[in-house]
Image: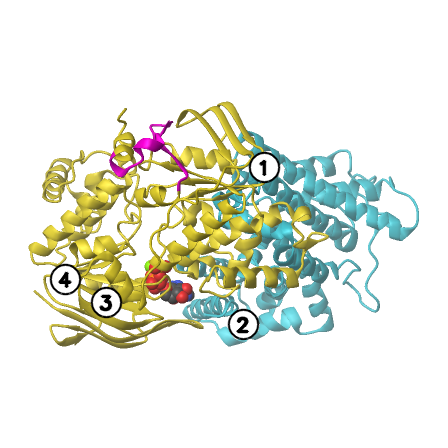
Amino acid sequence: MRAWIEPLLAIGLALLLAGGLLLGLGADPLAALAALARGAFGSAYALESTLTRAVPLCLVGLAVALAFRAGVWNIGGEGQICVGALVAAALGTRALVGGPAAAQVSLVLLAGAAAGALWAGIAAWLRVSRGVSEVLSTILLNFIALLGVAFAVHGPLQEAAGAYPQSDALGAAARLPRLAGLERLHAAAPLALLLPGLAWLLLFRSAAGLRLRAVGLAPEAARYAGVSPPREVVRVLLISGGIAGLAGAVEIAGVTARLFEGLSGGLGFTAIAVALLARLHPLAVIPAALFFASLATGSGALQRAAHVPKVLVQVIEALVIFLSVGFALRRGGR
Amino acid sequence: MPSIALREIHKRFGETVALSGASLELASGEIHALLGENGAGKTTLVRTLCGLHPPDSGRIEIDGETVGIPSPRRAQALGIGLVHQHFMGVPALSVAENLVLGEPGGLALRPRSLRARAREMLERWELDVDPDTPARELSVGQLQRLEIARVLGGGVETLVLDEPTAVLAPSEVGELLALLERLRDEGRSLVLISHKLEEITAVCDRVSVLRGGRTVASREVAGLDAARLGEWMVGRALPPRGRPAGTTPGPLALRLEGVKAEGLRGIDLELHGGEVLALAGIDGNGQLPLEELLAGVRPLGAGELNVLRPPLALVSGDRQRTGLALDLSLAENLILPAAARPRQSGMFRYGLLRAGELRKAAGEAIERHDIRGGERALARQLSGGNQQKLCIARSLRARPGVLAVVNPTRGLDVRAAAAVRGELRALAREGTAVLLISTDLDEVLELGDRIAVLFRGALSVVDPARRNRERIGELMLGGE
Ligand SMILES: Nc1ncnc2c1ncn2[C@@H]1O[C@H](COP(=O)(O)OP(=O)(O)OP(=O)(O)O)[C@@H](O)[C@H]1O
Ligand SMILES: [Mg+2]
């Protein structure tokens, strides 16, 4: 079976099952699908919203895929996004960086990436020196990061007006400009195409990528060949966390302009679904992110136009994840 | 008793044609040997018989009637069972639990009746172990016997064994062959895949030869000795088994002084360039710790290990676990050690792969070691013997000053095994220091300029004046 058939099959089956569910509820599944599609792609604005939403999904999905390839279960995308966003907001609102706009916004983004990397680095250190499973540590670090954001927006970073638990808006120079002629899509969006390409090069055309995949596929054989699995684990967690942190900073600098609670909104977890649907292939992460982004932006129209509750979208997401994992298990079982 | 015939079986895996017109006629009450080079299709052929992958075309007949065997369950219902080379049970379960694993409701038996059933089966198949022992505590030979008992437990009349002796110590091989004869004498039919011609002439009735996916010949074994069988199989005389190169040793290349680690009780050895030092011994007497020490994955407890003529390369004794990453391609496996040290290898520029270099390296290795498989084939898709050749090809890429090899010809066909031994000898002649760790006594005698025996984690050197099978056998069992 060709590699892209399984994901398409998973999506198709999930839509079919969701359609069956709608039929059972007495709704028209085709109308619902049409409403969903219109909501996601039906106008220039809808399309732009979908693309804007896809950017962080793509980045964090890539982060997750890279780590999973090395057999490192980074479940901490959510937390890494949060610290990336937190640091970006701190720098951007306090005008802690100066200089021309391009330099300011670059610094904000880089700082976010560094924060994400460091945050994931804690999990790496725990695993390598203490043998703590990264599954556990990254999940726990998620809670800490979420609480950190909550503390910041109620305390030190709260807006000067003091009305809402949110930060001030970033200074204009620290914000990402829109792409030429567009309303929403920001200048960092092309990163969602560029980074998967770079990741592909890394994974399949470099010494580091070969080591990383070997550690994920056959740690014992990798060790015998002279590769140090702990070193690769640390390296891939830093990269993975860095990309997720960057995504957080991009959201602040390019979309919300402010830090608030719930900023990541489960993005870190949807990203895991993106990576699984893409079968951990760095380029396939792009269409997979688009798919999940279109579900998210289309769900509003679904509710309004077809009178189907928004949660149906979550049902579809869950089905796609189950089916992707199911296919993967079937493949592994043979 | 049924007779079974496989006729004109074809099977492809993607591009690879594994079988193209293979057949096998198995009369009832015989031991039928299946011979052939690595990658000839032996495993694939018996797997079709056992329902593990149905053929693309061809017929399977039982007593003249065509049957379909789409699944292992169907094979089992037809009384056909397969003993894999590796233990397929659950290591954490007890011997008794493993025995009833495949039976409906087997694990629901009460402990007492479970133990009684197990004891009966164990006695029947002469396996002298406590039914309560966890399977992981058994030796390889015992595990295999357990596997056979497990498969036979299901009422099997036709038993297929895929290279069962490759992992056994010499004494265990004798026991296994005796068991096979007993099974035949009880009326079962057996298919035995093996690269060891002596085993075939010892117990088999008929032999069929596969070449390139086709059955090219089939005949009675009676009246053949190993040499004649080999000749008949290859179509010409096999080169005689060689003798140690006998070169004068060069400078010191590897020294171990009082080396202790988990499983090793103090090893002293000196290895010089240009010589082969062979370490004989039954599996489990320190081979694995020594191998891991040399691979750098087990910490040195005490003593000193010095490589005086680096680099040291190792061909591990377990190609599927530590030798290869099975889900990476042939070419990727070949350059994995280079990726661990990208700067010195010339295979990467700025950390990026040089595609031309890779293709050249893979082409050379495939050609020089006669590996049957393309550079993009996954290591998993190579036949066992070809996986082994890939491991050897990889270890030589670094131009090692010291080459340590563990059971280097395990699973290789006669010709490939001879080629590997020839290669080791040639390397020694060129000045490489070769450390051979092998459980195969013939191989040790054939290659070792000097011989020592590993027993319970310690070495005893074999006096050149008493260099013979009997003496080495004694030392292997801990004799003085
Ligand atoms: N799952 C698979 N996918 C692709 N190719 C395969 C697969 N299994 C076997 N092959 C190919 O089919 C051919 C026959 O393999 P097979 O394992 O039957 O050989 P064999 O005679 O058992 O060899 P050996 O003595 O080395 O065990 C080989 O070329 C092998 O690479
Ligand atoms: Mg085989």
Residue tagged 2: A32
- Return the mark for residue B208: 3
Quadrant of the rendered structure where residue B124 is? top left
Residue tagged 4: B222
Q: Is residue A4 left or right of residue B200?
A: right
- Mark 1 vs mark 4: tell me if same chain: yes
- Return the mark for residue B309: 1
**How far apart in space, not on screen, are marks 4 and 3 (Cα)?**
13 Å
Considering only order in the chain, which callout, 3 or 4, is on the residue closer to the N terminus? 3
At 45% across and 37% down in the image, what residue appears? B291
Residue bounds of the magenta highlight: B448-470
The residue lying toward the viewer, choosing from B10 and B70, is: B10
Considering only order in the chain, which callout, 1 or 3, is on the residue closer to the N terminus? 3
CB contact under 8 Å: marks 3 and 1 = no
The residue lying toward the viewer, choosing from B10 and A67, is: B10
Q: Is mark 3 within 8 Å of ligand 1?
A: no
At 28% across and 64% down in the image, what residue appears? B231
Q: Which lettered chain is shown in cyan?
A: A
